[in-house]
Amino acid sequence: MGLWQIDTDTLARSRFVLSPFAETFASLKLLHAGTGAHPGEEAWLRAHLSGYRARLAADPVAALVARVALGTSWIADFFCPTSCEGESFEETVARVRATGPEEARANLRVCLRGPLPAALERDDLPERATALLTYVWEETVRPYWERRRRVLEADMAARTARVSQGGWAAVLDSLQPGTRWLGESRFQVNVNAYPPRKIAAGAELLFMPVTPKNGWVSWEGRERYAVVYPCLGVLAEDHDRRPAPAGLGALIGSSRAGLLMLLGTPMSTTQLVAVTGQVLGSVGRHLRVLLDAGLVERRRAGRSVLYVRTAAGEVLTEASRTRTGTRTGTRTGTGDRKPEPGTH
């Protein structure tokens, strides 16, 4: 298994940070896979996958760089630098562009575990990678960034609160499949057989949530390490941005209907505030009405309380979707050192 040895002082100083670059790279991985983990990702892919594939067809070298750099268990170092706290996408991707040609080729050889194909024996690989990453940011992430940022901030707030309530062990165990705090300064970052890494005292340890359902670990030298993990819940998806069906809104109120539509996935009040823009008091009052009506229920996850639709809530939302689709004549629907956790 992949193990990091972390002293208590380093863990105590670690923090959750936003990274537009990590969100972009996670979105690139989703586009590369071409298959979503849930209906929201599938909806996003329907909107952007054809454009991404057309972009690759127009630049076969970039397509080959992406295919090799993403690898099966090892991400090319130059293609995915570890973001600094407060760093913009442009600042992070500038480090991709600044990579020396030979270093880029060496990174790709590590991914392939052998020689490069002739098409990659060239000096403009960093520029090709930069252009592709910038396309993904500008066309598929930036238009949604403000909402995704609120979702990610909600996740970070919930995780930070859990640290204060249950300690780091509870948080590390819940980041994603394959991560566990083993005690005695040992943090399992994935389930694959790689030699343990000892994180030096004074190193920076960052935790970066992303909305796509994938993650990885990375580091820069011995001074900065990052764990990129999927945020809680299906939160940043286009299908959740659609207005609640009018009939459902008329029945229980538009604000409560919007919350009920979101709660197909368990979410905390903090996350609901971030996603909807409603104030905490209003969200709490609406949840109480939905609870009393038997449309949602509470579930405890560690020390956190999450809300999710009940079977009755599912029947009501599905009936509303179906009825709306019938009236409009349309169908409703869900209409490196950088190994990937769980695979190395």
Image (spheres, rainbow, N blue to C red):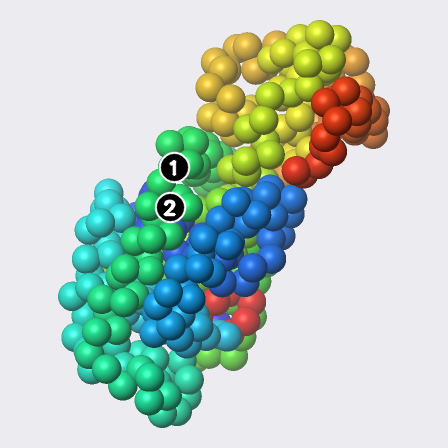
Q: Residue at x 35, y 40 (%)?
A: 142
* Residue situated furthest bottom in the rendering: 115
| Most foreground residue, 285 or 145 | 145
Mark-to-mark CA distance, 2 and 1: 7 Å
Residue 215 vertical position relative to residue 196 in the rendered view, above or below: above
Q: Is residue 317 visible?
A: no
In the displayed structure, does residue 181 sit left or right of residue 127?
right
Amino acid type of the residue that numbered disc 2 sits on in the rendered structure: Glu
Give the residue displayed 38% in from the left and 46% down from the top: 139
Residue in view at x 21 percent, y 74 percent: 124
Q: Amino acid at mark 1?
A: Pro
Q: Label 2: which residue?
A: 139
Q: Are marks 2 and 1 in contact (CB under 8 Å)?
A: yes
Q: Position of residue 47 (x, y in %)?
A: 52, 45
Helix, strand or loop under label 2: helix
Where residue 242 sits in the image (x, y, percent)? 58, 26
Q: Which residue is mark 1?
A: 143
Location of residue 307 in the rendering, given as x and y in whole percent from the top left corner: 66, 28
Question: In terms of depth relative to the viewer, which is nearer, 5 or 253?
Answer: 253
Q: Is residue 106 above or below residue 302?
A: below
Looking at the rendered structure, the secondary structure element under dot 1 is: helix
Q: Is residue 249 above or below residue 132?
A: above
State the image coordinates of residue 296 (x, y, percent, origin top left).
74, 23
Residue at the location (68% across, 14% down)?
246
Q: Residue 44 sits in which quadrant?
A: top right
